[in-house]
């Protein structure tokens, strides 16, 4: 290459680099465009959990029909807990609340009466349906009737569902449904796991770390019209006063509760 040509390239090259830099800057940036698209207005819909909640042993014991020590055996079947109000033997045609039935081997009855093997129904999945509309509401009064409707429906995991582990020995606080001859959780928490070292562990989604609770109690979905919604479950918090307790100490606590119950019956 001649000296004259090299000198010419030295003058042109900086201009080409500058032009290339300006071109790259002006081109659309995928990351930024995707971020703008993803920023949608999300409406939050919340529901208050309607289940009794308490981490106090006295409350758990008082509300339960039976308190049983034993082990889950196996999953038997799923069914729709929502029934036809006119005929409870039929499932609802409009609502869906799935329950999972497990067999349970009873080793010891700590309150009430139960057979050696029972069937326990655990709520599993629930459906929440509704619709958004364009009605205008001011101070609690509708000032403009709705003209557009956007239905939605979401199936979410029951807020307190925890899959039973057959290998674990546990204490359950249950209520009994005589018509169906099935037991179900009487309160949340309803299960205490017995560890091999004799120590106890209260088991509940309410005791999960805050981030895990948030993931468990929130469900994202879209309406039929495509609007994003966030469905949230609001529930009470509890304090764990049972985990770390030894089995012997726990049984003494139960004996005290049983004595108090007997005294109340006598007083009545």
Image (cartoon, rainbow, N blue to C red):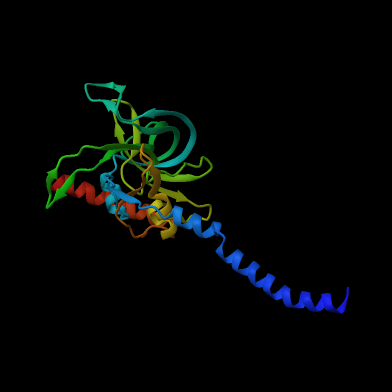
Q: Residue furthest right?
A: 1
The residue at the point 17 percent across, 48 percent down is 264
Q: Residue furthest front?
A: 4
The residue at the point 88 percent across, 76 percent down is 2
Residue 170 picture quarter: top left
Q: Is residue 243 visible?
A: yes
The residue at the point 26 percent across, 37 percent down is 149
Q: Nearer the viewer, residue 152 or 85?
A: 152
Q: Is residue 204 visible?
A: no
The residue at the point 36 percent across, 38 percent down is 225
Horizontally, residue 228 falls left or right of residue 88, namely right
Q: Position of residue 242 (x, y in %)?
A: 38, 57
Residue 155 picture quarter: top left
Horizontally, residue 4 falls left or right of residue 144, namely right
Q: Nearer the viewer, residue 147 or 188?
A: 147
Q: Position of residue 59 (x, y in %)?
A: 27, 51
């Amino acid at each position: 290459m001649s000296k004259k040509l090299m000198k010419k390239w030295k003058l042109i090259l900086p201009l080409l680099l500058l032009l290339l830099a300006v071109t790259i800057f002006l081109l659309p940036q995928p990351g930024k465009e995707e971020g703008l698209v993803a920023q949608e207005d999300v409406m939050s819909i919340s529901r208050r959990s309607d289940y009794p909640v308490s981490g106090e042993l006295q409350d758990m014991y008082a509300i339960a029909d039976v308190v049983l020590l034993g082990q889950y055996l196996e999953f038997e079947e799923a069914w729709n807990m929502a029934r036809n109000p006119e005929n409870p033997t039929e499932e609802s045609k409009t609502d869906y609340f799935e329950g999972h039935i497990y067999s349970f081997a009873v080793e010891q009855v700590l309150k009430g009466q139960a057979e050696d093997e029972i069937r326990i129904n655990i709520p599993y999945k629930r459906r929440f349906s509704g619709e958004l509309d364009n009605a205008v509401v001011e101070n609690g009064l509708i000032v403009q009737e709705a003209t557009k409707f956007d239905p939605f429906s979401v199936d979410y995991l029951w807020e307190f569902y925890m899959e039973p582990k057959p290998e674990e020995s546990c204490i359950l606080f249950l209520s009994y449904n005589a018509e169906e001859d099935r037991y179900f959780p009487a309160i949340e928490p309803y299960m205490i796991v017995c560890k091999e070292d004799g120590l106890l562990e209260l088991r509940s989604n309410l005791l999960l770390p805050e981030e895990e609770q948030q993931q468990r109690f929130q469900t994202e979905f879209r309406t039929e019209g495509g609007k994003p919604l966030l469905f949230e479950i609001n529930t009470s918090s509890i304090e764990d006063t049972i985990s770390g307790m030894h089995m012997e100490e726990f049984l003494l606590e139960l004996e005290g509760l049983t004595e108090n119950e007997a005294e109340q019956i006598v007083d009545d």
